[in-house]
Image (cartoon, rainbow, N blue to C red):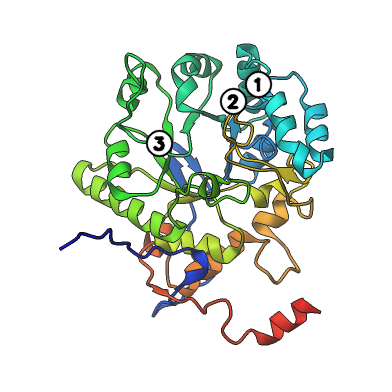
Amino acid sequence: MPRFKELRRAYGFDEVAIVPGELTINPELVELGLEVGGFKFPIPFMASAMDAVVDPSFAIAMHNAGGLAVLNLEGVWTRYDDPASILQEVASANRDEATILLQKAYQAEIRDDLIARRIHEIKDGGGVAAVSVTPLNTKRMAPIVQEAGADIVFVQSTVTTARHESSSMEGLRFDKLLEYIHIPVVVGNTVGFTATLELMRTGVAGVLVGVGPGAACTSREVLGIGVPQVTSTIECAAARDYYYEESGRYVPIITDGGIRTGGDVCKCFAAGADAIMMGSPFAATTEAPGRGYHWGMATPHAHLPRGTRVQVGVNTTLQKLLYGPTSRTDGTENLVGALRTAMGMCGSHTIREFQQAEMVVAPAIKTEGKIYQFAEARR
């Protein structure tokens, strides 16, 4: 008999729902703390390492708000003394010109002095200096980053694994990296149990979850690669729990990308996330440097761009996005309040307890009984 490839079902945010608990508690009683590599944060929210989302000023503002923002060390902030004109050009360009303009802008050399300067700017402002590099540049940049005083290093690419073949004498090995730099290293991105478990066994301090869900990412269209975020988070959370039983070391997972509303935020944690990372919602704040636009780290790729510039507008503030108050009814502001409320409805005092909340497959969760909302939206 012929053997046929079998497909398993995977789920995204709009296909599942969280089931309320048998106990409810007041939202103000829940605890939202996050620890990564010895650094503790009041809220488990991170801002993506995108040039139009995080600059040193935004990183400081995010720290003051209780979360963590990650600065891209291979973007315009380390290629230009003042990238304001570049950001303005990108915001002013039409859609067809934007990627070409970005490709040209990213041809300028990355400057070691600017790497150090940006880290110092964040530290001088009282923030935790979290920075992002790609695996290709990690070996060269890691000593510079450590000497400049960075607190956490994110090593990010579309897909990251512990085992990698390349034409170099020895590719990037995270266990070796951790022998010569003494900074917590968070790696990503992954979507499955085995790859996540192998990364945790190298000694990393955290793992980013998600391939292709971000609004500015086109990897799913260009490469056809990706797994919906709820399923990805569940599988990576299983690897985290397995590794904790195996080693006694708890390595947080961070669901990264595709998160639009408070409901999406809550589903990430119920699926097993310890933290979330967002780009588009933060790009729409007055504090973000992108002037209402943003793009992914792979958008300026010289040969195969896997991202696009998207317009999100400037329509909120960091305070309102995270904490409110808000008059919006679509769940796009007061995300921390949404998380607290959902945890209270499930009787969860902590994120760890909320990770155990029951979830169901519910493809009608956003449409059931909502005919009047849809009619109003069409008017």
Helix, strand or loop for disc 2: loop
Circle 1: residue type: Thr
- Where residue 379 sits: x, y (%)? 81, 79
Q: Is residue 30 visible?
A: no
Q: Nearer the viewer, mark 3 or mark 1?
A: 3
263 to the left or right of 280: left
- Point out residue 206 in the picture as x, y percentages from the top left corner: 40, 40
Q: Which residue is mark 1?
A: 78
- Quadrant of the drawing holding the N terminus: bottom left
Q: Amino acid at mark 3?
A: Thr
> Element under label 3?
loop
Residue 369 is situated, as x and y percent measured from the top left of the image, at 60, 87
**Toward the viewer: 304 or 27?**
304
Q: Secondary structure at mark 1?
A: helix
Q: CA distance from mark 3 to mark 2?
A: 18 Å
Q: Would residue 352 appear left or right of 144 to someone viewing this image?
A: left
Q: Point out the tag, 2 or 1, that comes first from the N-terminus.
A: 2
Mark 2 and mark 1 in contact? Answer it, CB < 8 Å: yes
Frontmost residue, 131 versus 92: 92
Q: Are marks 3 and 1 in contact (CB under 8 Å)?
A: no
Question: Alpha-carbon neighbours of circle 2 within 10 Å: few (<14), some, or many (≥20)?
Answer: many
For badge 2, the amino acid type reads Leu
Q: Is residue 213 left or right of residue 36?
A: right
Height in image: 146 above or below 255? Answer: above
Q: Eyeballing the image, is 12 above or below 99? A: below
